[in-house]
Amino acid sequence: IAISLPDPLEQPVVIITGQTEIDECSPLQLYATDSYFLGGKASYRWELLGYTDLTNNPAGRIYNQTKMDLLRFVLENASNFNEGKVESPPQYLEEAVLFTLNLTVTSRWGLSQSLLVDITKLDAPAPMVSILGPKELLVNRTEQVSLLANGVPSECLTVSTQLEYRWIETTGQLDLSSIPEIVYTTRSLVIPPFVLEPIGSGSDLNTYNFTVETFAVDSPNKAAYASVTVKVRRSPVFAYLATEDRLMTRGDILVLDARESQDPDYPTNPGMTFLGTFQWWCLTPERLPCFGTNSTGLIPPLETCITDFDSTIVQGGNLFSTPLFDNGLYCRWARGVLMVSTV
C-alpha cells in the first residue's frame, strides 16, 4: 500500500478559543483544539513572549516574578505534554497586566503556523464575554444575521452573577436603538434581512463592527467587551423577461420586456422597473452579431421607438403601442424594453 501526502498540502489553521480578558478571580482557559489542517495529529508549543503593565504607574512596575515563573511553568508543561489547551488558576497571573502568548502548531506533515494572543488580567471583579462563532462574517443583504454572546460571571463572591448585555455598532453606520424590531439588550443580537447595506459594485464589501458590552447588574461600571466584524457583499443580479423563449412568425415584432429584472438586495416590485441599467446582446446561429460589428453581439446604442398610438400589440400580459421602425430594425420602447423587427 502506497500512501502519499495530501495534495495540496495545506498550512495549519490555528484557532484559539476561550476568554482573553479575565478578572482577578477567574482562571485562564485557552483551547486550540478547533485548529484544522493538522493531519489528525499535531504538536503544540505555548510561549510567553512578553507582558505590559496596565496600571500606567509613572514610577514603574515591579512584577511578582514568582507569578511570572508559575505562568511560564504552566505554558512549558502544556508544551511538554503536547496539550492543545492551557489552563491556569487565577493566582498564577499577576493582575493589571497584558500578557502576550504565542502558540505554534505543527501538523503531522511538519508544517507550522503561529498565532499571537493577548490576555488581559484585570485587577478587579468583572464578567468575561465572547461572541460565539467566527470573528468575521461575510453575508448578503438578504440574510438574517444572528450574533450570540457568551457571558461568564465573575467568580468573585463580592459581585452578582446576573449579567446584562448591550450591543452597539461602532462604525456609525447603524443605530440599533432606532430600529424597533431589533432587541439589543440581550445576549443575542438578531439583525433582520435588508437592514445591512452593501456598497459599490462587484466584489466591494461594506464593513460593520458589532460590540457587545456585558456587566453584572450591581456593577455596571465593571464591563467586559467582545466584537465581531460583519462584511456585506452584493447579491448577484438576475434578468427576468416577461416572455421567455417563444415561437414566432417572420414579420412579427419581437418584444423583450426585462423591466422586472431583479436585484435581490433591492427587489423590483410588481409593475415597477428595475433600478439598474440594461444592455442587450444578440448573436445569430452562426455566433455573428445581429446588429453592428461588435463581436460579442452587444447591440449599438438604442434610440427611443417612434410608435403608432392607434395600433397596439400584447406581449407577456402587457399592452404596447406599435413601433414604426422608421430608423432601423430595433429600438427602445421604454427603459428595459427592446423592440425588434423580424421583417
Image: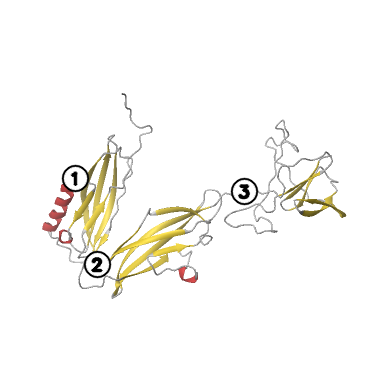
Q: Are marks 2 and 1 in contact (CB under 8 Å)?
A: no
For marks 2 and 1, the one nearer the N-term is 1
The residue tagged 2 is 154
Mark 3–mark 2 distance (CA, rounded to whole Å): 52 Å
**Mark 3 vs 1, N-terminal side:** 1
Location of residue 260 by image quarter: bottom right
Horizontal and vertical percent position of residue 238: 62, 48
Secondary structure under tag 3 reads loop
| Residue nearer the viewer, 15 or 246 | 246
Q: Residues within 10 Å of mark 3 (few under 14, many from 20)?
A: few
In the depicted structure, whether residue 178 falls above or below residue 233: below
Residue 42 vs 312, above or below: the answer is above
The residue indicated by pointer 3 is 238
| Visible residue check, residue 331 | yes
Nearer-the-camera pick, 117 or 139: 139
Give the residue pinned by disc 1: 79
Which residue, as the protein is rendered here, is positioned at the far bottom?
A: 218
Query: Mark 3 and 1 residues: CB-CB less than 8 Å, in contact?
Result: no
Amino acid on which the number 3 mark rests in the picture? Phe
Residue 170 visible at all = no
Quarter location, residue 210: bottom left
Can you give x and y, in whole percent of width and height, for residue 58 in the image? 20, 66
Mark 2 and mark 1: Cα distance apart in space: 28 Å
